Amino acid sequence: MNKADLVDSLVANVGLPKGQAEKVIDSLMETVITEVAKGGKVLLVGFGSWETSQRKERNGRNPKTNEPLRIPAKRVVRFKVGKEFAQAVNKSK
């Protein structure tokens, strides 16, 4: 499912006009990105949560030359799936 499919699903399920549904999705994505980028956490109970964590600097290897290199530290986004989401995924097997 891509963004257009998600918009169509929102239109069908909620009855919003397509333009408004797209604005809702865009606003949600922008809000999550902005909050997580400032170091905050976004929690949607039952769905999951987004937050950042710090990845330490580490050693690595260039796969082409096999030369060692340093991979710098950086912030990464983590998503932890909610309990209800996980249960729904496991039921669908």
Image (cartoon, grey):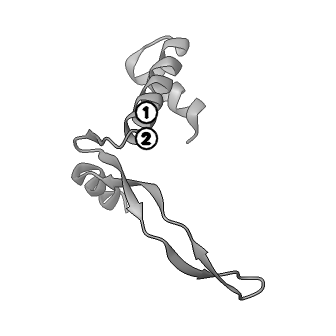
Residue 53: x, y in percent? Answer: 36, 57
45 or 72: nearer the viewer = 72
Of the 4 image quadrants, the one containing the C terminus is bottom left
46 or 16: nearer the viewer = 46
Distance, label 1 to label 2, CA atoms, is 5 Å
Identify residue for label 2: 37
| Circle 1: element type | helix
Pick out the residue farthest to the bottom.
66
Tell me which amino acid carries mark 2. Answer: Ala
The mark tally for this picture is 2
Placement of 48 over or under 76, stated as above or below: above
Within the image, what quadrant is residue 46 found in?
A: top left
Residue 5: x, y in percent? Answer: 56, 33
Residue 24: x, y in percent? Answer: 45, 20
Of the 4 image quadrants, the one containing the N terminus is top right
| Circle 2: element type | helix
Placement of 34 over or under 41, stated as above or below: above
Residue 41: x, y in percent? Answer: 30, 43
28 or 76: nearer the viewer = 76
- Mark 1 near mark 2, Cβ–Cβ under 8 Å? yes
Placement of 79 over or under 73, stated as above or below: above
| Dot label at residue 34 | 1
Tell me which amino acid carries mark 1. Answer: Thr
70 or 30: nearer the viewer = 70
The residue located at (71%, 87%) in the rendering is 67
The residue located at (26%, 56%) in the rendering is 87
